[in-house]
Amino acid sequence: MPRKKRERVSTPGGFLALPKLLMEQDDFRELSPSAMKVLMVLGSQYNGRNNGDLSATHSMMRDWGGMAEGTLSKALKELQDRKLIVKSRENRRGREGARCALYALTWQTIDDCPGKDLDLVPSIVPYRKLSQG
């Protein structure tokens, strides 16, 4: 008897895949609640082609229940210290206006993000290698 062809599953609005190997790491499991929330904010922006063009600003956090600026700064530092994200562009304020810092998820490759003036070059290998053990 022929097998039925499986229909493609579509998730409206996309989805964030967290690799089990990442979730099994102590540095992920021991994240503070604030850092986990910021990681979800960054991950919600990732579409498979824009790693390096992810941001978490104080005004963005209002849509996620709010977060004090100091808490946001501490959470971003925690994520960077645990090598779950990497800063791909520094924030800047000047006569031309302000621009926010941008980040990339370390378990994905860095994408080419034209017009974003990233400090990182596109990569074919993720910054963080996931392995068992």
Image: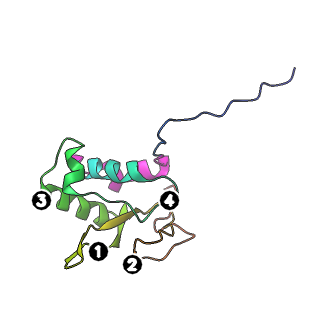
Whether label 1 touches label 2, CB < 8 Å: yes
Q: Using residue 43 as the reference point, say whether residue 124 is left or right of it.
A: right
Seen from the viewer's position, the closer of residues 35 and 114 is 114
Q: Residue at x 25, y 61 (%)?
A: 76
* Circle nearer the N terminus (4, 3): 3
Local SS, label 1: loop
Region of the chain picked out in magenta, as a range = 17-33
Would residue 76 be seen by someone viewing this image from the given angle? yes
Would residue 24 be seen by someone viewing this image from the given angle? no
Q: Residue at x 34, y 48 (%)?
A: 40
Kindly identify which residue carries mark 2. Answer: 119
Local SS, label 4: loop
Q: Is residue 20 above or below residue 1?
A: below
* Circle nearer the N terminus (1, 4): 1
Q: Residue at x 51, y 65 (%)?
A: 109
User: Quarter-wise, where is residue 78 in the image?
Assistant: bottom left
Tell me residue 12's x, y (percent): 50, 35
Kindly identify which residue carries mark 3. Answer: 70
Q: Using residue 75 as the reference point, say whether residue 2 is left or right of it.
A: right
Kindly identify which residue carries mark 4. Answer: 130
* Distance between mark 1 and mark 2 Cα atoms: 8 Å
* Distance between mark 1 and mark 4 Cα atoms: 26 Å
> How many other residues sit within 10 Å of disc 4, few (<14), some (14-19) or many (≥20)?
some
* Distance between mark 4 and mark 3 Cα atoms: 30 Å
Checking the image for residue 90, the label placed there is 1
* Circle nearer the N terminus (1, 2): 1
* Distance between mark 3 and mark 1 Cα atoms: 17 Å
Which one is in front in this view, the residue at disc 2 or the one at disc 3?
A: 2
Tell me residue 41's x, y (percent): 32, 49
